Image: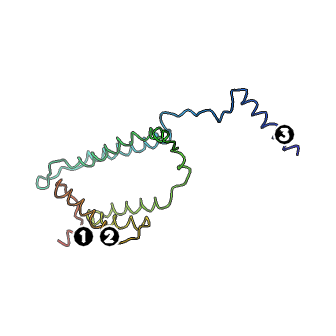
């Protein structure tokens, strides 16, 4: 009991000291930094990746006149990189927006990353790597079929039409409306 009474006395002494300083320290509102440090580090990593990929686009070969379109070959990759970079610049300030809605951005970060995230990344990397062989349309169709199944959506009456119609609409938009060349792949080249 003497050990309990000593620890209780120490706790009471701490409470008395905090009361003498002006009340309970936990009751005082915490100062919120303008820039979230974790998101700032992530922003720097993403911007460095965007800069590296932007540098890669400077080495794109000129397209021959037979395949030339109204835009240079680096236009769409650079447009995507600029969009990612601009949205990334908002990340360090997202915690301020969420705080106004009484949400803590760090609350979900204590949980480990779920394995489904790694499976999804691996599947998408494999599909992107297979575009030169499968072609853009087939790779998009496989992605639209495999991702819902991987995430647990087993209603095939919704998954199969989505896997056929969405890639078809994207192909029509890019190949016919925007006149963007999309890789047919070795598989479709041998069929035709």
As drawn, the residue found furthest toward the top would be 21
**Which of the labelled discs sits on residue 187, or is there none?**
1
Expressed as whole percent of the image width and height from the top left, the position of residue 6 reads 84, 39
> Height in image: 106 above or below 155?
above
Q: Secondary structure at mark 3?
A: helix
Residue behind mark 3: 6
Q: Quadrant of residue 2?
A: top right
* Residue located 26% across and 65% down the image: 165
Expressed as whole percent of the image width and height from the top left, the position of residue 62 reads 18, 49
Marks 2 and 1, Cα distance to the nearest angstrom? 21 Å
Labels 2, 1: front one: 2
Name the N-terminal-most of marks 2 and 3.
3
* Residue located 36% across and 72% down the image: 156
Marks 3 and 1, Cα distance to the nearest angstrom? 79 Å
Along the line of sight, which residue is nearer the eye, 42 or 164? 164
Dot 1: few (<14), some (14–19), or many (≥20) neighbours within 10 Å?
some
Residue behind mark 2: 160
> Height in image: 111 above or below 119?
above
Expressed as whole percent of the image width and height from the top left, the position of residue 12 reads 79, 35
Give the tally of numbered discs: 3
Quarter containing the C terminus: bottom left
Name the N-terminal-most of marks 3 and 1.
3
Q: Secondary structure at mark 1?
A: helix
Dot 2: few (<14), some (14–19), or many (≥20) neighbours within 10 Å?
some
Name the N-terminal-most of marks 2 and 1.
2
As drawn, the residue found furthest toward the left would be 66
* Residue located 33% across and 64% down the image: 144
């Amino acid at each position: 009991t003497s050990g309990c009474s000593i620890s209780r006395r120490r706790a009471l002494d701490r409470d008395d000291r905090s009361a003498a300083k002006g009340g309970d320290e936990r009751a005082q509102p915490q100062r919120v930094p303008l820039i979230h440090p974790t998101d700032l580090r992530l922003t720097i990593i993403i911007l460095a990746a965007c800069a590296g990929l932007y540098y890669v686009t400077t080495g794109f070969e000129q397209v021959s006149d037979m395949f030339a379109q109204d835009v240079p070959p680096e236009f769409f990759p650079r447009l995507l990189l600029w969009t990612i970079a601009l949205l990334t610049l908002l990340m360090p300030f997202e915690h301020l927006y969420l705080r106004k809605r009484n949400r803590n951005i760090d609350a979900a970060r204590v949980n480990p990353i779920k394995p489904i995230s790694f499976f999804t990344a691996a599947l998408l990397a494999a599909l992107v790597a297979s575009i030169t062989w499968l072609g853009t349309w087939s790779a998009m169709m496989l992605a639209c079929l495999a991702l819902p199944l991987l995430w647990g959506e087993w209603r095939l009456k919704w998954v199969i039409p989505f896997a056929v119609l969405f890639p078809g609409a994207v192909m029509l938009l890019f190949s016919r409306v925007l006149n963007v060349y999309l890789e047919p792949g070795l598989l479709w080249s041998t069929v035709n």
